[in-house]
Image (cartoon, helix red, strand yellow):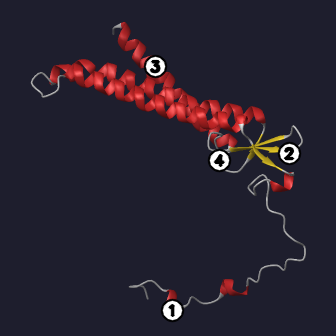
Amino acid sequence: MDLRTKICIWVILIGMGNFLAYTIGYTILGGEAVRGEAYLIEGTEKDYYFLDSGKEVSWDQFLYSGIHSISIWLTVAAIMMAMLTLAKDRIVDSMHEAVVRGRTLCTVLAVAIGFCTAGLMFQFVREFVQHFENPTVITSKADLPPGPSNPPKRDNAEAPADHAHDNAAPRDDLARPGRQ
């Protein structure tokens, strides 16, 4: 096995390890930060960080999640380039009489992979940095959006829901066509 093949295999294995680590981190944290939100209480230095799932996390967890989400695009590019490099000789050998030569196709694919993943990575970086540069300013903690970490407050005067209809017989007018 030549050096190029060994390097490509290691890039693929390390990239797959990064995907696994991202999946585990996403599951443990309960979401990701790039699509999350940062809040700042007006007149204070107190920040609140929420993942895309609405779960509140610490600054460290928010930062880790955002950086790892951004790194996935680099991982995608590295794995695809390594796979393309491993397949290049076979592609070149099979496309001698095609409209597009094999080397040209490999170059076009490599450039497309590079541009697409770089563009997506740039978009993720831009969105993530916005959370820190321009957090959503709120007047009090009560203004935080409801979610798993911040359930909505229920008025004590609010009557409990009537669940008498839960055991009611199904209505015929709601039945699906073809079902009896």
Give the secondary structure at mark 4: loop
Disc on the earlier residue, 4 or 3: 3
Q: Does the CB distance between marks 4 and 2 fall below 8 Å?
A: no
Can you give x and y, in whole percent of width and height, for residue 61 in the image? 73, 35
Q: Which amino acid type corresponds to the residue marked 3 in the rendered image?
A: Val
Disc on the earlier residue, 4 or 2: 2
Residue 52, numbered label: 4
Binning the other alpha carbons within 10 Å of mark 1 as few (below 14), some (14 to 19) or many (20 upward) gives few
Q: CA distance from mark 1 to mark 2?
A: 54 Å
Binning the other alpha carbons within 10 Å of mark 3 as few (below 14), some (14 to 19) or many (20 upward) gives some
Can you give x and y, in whole percent of width and height, for residue 4 in the image? 36, 11
- Which image quarter is the N terminus in? top left
Disc on the earlier residue, 1 or 2: 2
Residue at 81% over, 55% down:
143
Q: Which amino acid type corresponds to the residue marked 4 in the rendered image?
A: Asp
Q: CA distance from mark 3 to mark 1?
A: 60 Å
| Pointer 1 residue | 172
Query: Up-down: is 34 above or below 13?
Result: below
| Pointer 2 residue | 42
Disc on the earlier residue, 3 or 1: 3
Q: Does the CB distance between marks 4 and 1 fall below 8 Å?
A: no
Binning the other alpha carbons within 10 Å of mark 2 as few (below 14), some (14 to 19) or many (20 upward) gives some
Q: Which amino acid type corresponds to the residue marked 2 in the rendered image?
A: Glu
- Which image quarter is the C terminus in? bottom left
Residue 11, numbered label: 3
